[in-house]
Amino acid sequence: MVAPHTVPEVSLRGVSAGYARTLALSQLDWDVPSLTVTAVLGPNGSGKSTLLGLLAGVIPATSGTVFHRSTVRPAFVMQRSAVADTLPLTVREAVTMGRWGRLGLLRRPSTEDREAVDANMERLDVAALAQRQLGELSGGQRQRVLVAQGLAQGADLLLLDEPASALDGSARETIARVLDEVTAEGTTVVQATHDITAARRAGHCLLLEGGRLAAAGPPHLVLAEADRGAAPGR
């Protein structure tokens, strides 16, 4: 029997995707390794955000096949700037939104749901902010709330679009620590990042250039490839 960690979380074969008439990813062949953190690197416009949207199922492939090991919907945490600061939500309400897929429209949160919300607010160090409005928080606090919301979903695959962008060192370390913890507990993580420290800490790296796979594998090899070519910024 094949050990679970050797089975890819997602397999992409000949996958292309984009928006309207613009192709953002072209003929991508890649296996997302399970139970580890993958850092997706590449310059601006290389297709990192499109890849996350494709893995999340919110952007369709225009060709090729995408096979998910799990039937559970992935959790997708977008960039902090994509979330309106004026949303009339408390921190607890925002994190509870991560349970909506399990609750449906008419069910009230169960004890299990409330425990999941509490546990992930504690994990991201935002429990003390539970009754604060999202718009009152600092950028780092808001980003940690969004990661807590993603974790509350309880998905097998967690996707993050530059979760530590413009955050201070303490917030970066909190998020990195939590990602290490959840992979040890059985979650697969894919994060788009321009943070070299985060890439070195990952278990696997993917380098995109012009919507194509330039390199994939251990961080030290992929970062060496990035140094020879395009810088791994956004």
Image (spheres, rainbow, N blue to C red):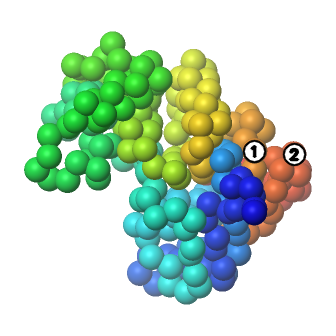
- Residue 20 locus on image (x, y percent): 41, 81
Mark carried by residue 84: none
* Amino acid bearing label 1: Gly
- Residue 120 locus on image (x, y percent): 41, 28
The residue under label 1 is: 203
- Residue 82 locus on image (x, y percent): 36, 47
Give how far apart the Cα atoms at labels 1 and 2 are. Answer: 10 Å
Up the image or down, 136 lies above or below 211; here it is above
- Residue 12 locus on image (x, y percent): 63, 74
Instruction: Looking at the image, tell me whether mark 1 or mark 2 is earlier in sequence order.
Output: 1
Picture quadrant of residue 48: bottom right
- State left or right for residue 21 relative to residue 8: left
* Amino acid bearing label 2: His
**Which-is-in-front pick, marks 1 and 2?**
1
| Secondary structure at numbered mark 2 | helix
| Secondary structure at numbered mark 1 | loop
> Does residue 98 appear in the picture of this structure?
yes
Residue drawn at (55%, 68%) of the image: 68
Q: Are marks 1 and 2 in contact (CB under 8 Å)?
A: no
The residue under label 2 is: 220
Residue drawn at (33%, 27%) of the image: 115
Picture quadrant of residue 66: bottom right
- Residue that protrudes farthest toward the front in the picture: 1
- Quarter in which the N terminus is drawn: bottom right
- Residue that protrudes farthest toward the top in the picture: 128
Badge 1 crowding class, 10 Å Cα cut-off, few under 14, some 14 to 19, many 20 or more, is some
- Residue that protrudes farthest toward the left in the picture: 106
- State left or right for residue 63 relative to residue 220: left
Residue drawn at (75%, 36%) of the image: 201
Badge 2 crowding class, 10 Å Cα cut-off, few under 14, some 14 to 19, many 20 or more, is some
Give the number of callouts.
2
Up the image or down, 122 lies above or below 62; here it is above
